[in-house]
Image: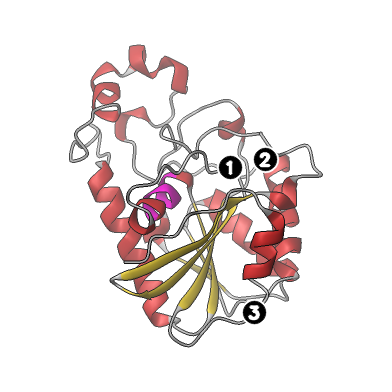
Amino acid sequence: MTIPIPVLHNPSFSNQLVTNSPHPDYAEIVVVRHGETAWNATAKIQGHLDVELNENGREQAAVVGDRLSREAKASVIYASDLQRAFETAQIIASKCGGLEVVKDSDLRERHLGDLQGHLYHEIAKTSPIAYKAFISKNEDEEIPGGGESLVQLFDRSTSALLRIGLKHKGERVVVVTHGGFIRALYKRACPNGSPGKVLNTSVSVFHLYGEDKWTLKVWSDVSHLSKTRFLESGFGGDKNSG
């Protein structure tokens, strides 16, 4: 496994890396977190609940779409079937010459069970059993109400990206998904690293050679938002993601 040192929010580095077409030995996968929702803005837990983008989120999606339109051309966009990711992908596609958007339910956020639909700062009181499972150090512990464990999220996330990578070796593809999902990908590429926060419409770039070799080239870059008011907006994308 190749474990690079990730680069955070470095526009010159990220632009340099993604201007050329991918090598035939790997798939270059550009992973984008969805734009902001009203629930992100109020720290309400979404998980698998289907919440649409707010106007900030649509503007963020347009900005990241403009960025990607100036980079090497992607062959296709994959997106979680949840509205906030799928709409982000559609906006990106419209900026990139009308790329096909493929819905994939395996790209969903972590299912957070009984915590979904609750304000984050209230869940310790409103759902104490589920909250205890959520903060547990046991990564195999599932969240009551149909929620996933961290191990289940990791297995689903990495399997989904590997499936896409093997199908598109030698190509550049875009994947629009969710904060918890993206953090799981980071753990696969950099098992000893610390992912930090994955902001709305942040861009990460992975090179997938096969099951045993993942390289992280760009991590959680938001240079496209640097001249907007959106840089620090939104909830999720960290250990509380959802």
Left or right of residue 120, residue 128 in this image:
left
At x 27%, y 43%, the residue is: 150
Task: Say if the magenta span includes residue 144.
Answer: no
| Horizontal relation, residue 236 to residue 95: left or right | left
* Residue 137 in the image, given as x and y percentages of width and height: 23, 30
User: In the image, 131: left or right of 108?
Assistant: left
Which residue in the structure is indicated by mark 1?
199
**Residue 175 visible in the displayed image:** yes
Question: In the picture shown, does residue 125 fall above or below 75?
Answer: above
Which one is in front in this view, the residue at disc 1 or the one at disc 3? 3
Magenta: predominant secondary structure element?
helix
Q: Which residues are magenta?
A: 180-185
Residue at image mark 3: 20
Instruction: Tell me residue 87's x, y (percent).
Output: 61, 56
Q: Which residue is mark 2?
A: 54
Amino acid type at mark 1? Leu
- In front: label 2 or label 3: 3
Estimate how packed mark 2 is, as few (under 14), some (14 to 19) or many (20 or more) residues with alpha carbons within 10 Å.
some
Q: Amino acid at mark 2?
A: Asn
Q: Residue at x 38, y 19 (%)?
A: 123
Q: Nearer the viewer, mark 1 or mark 2?
A: 1
What residue is at 57 percent from the left and 33 percent from the top?
A: 40
N-terminal of the pair, mark 1 or mark 3, is 3
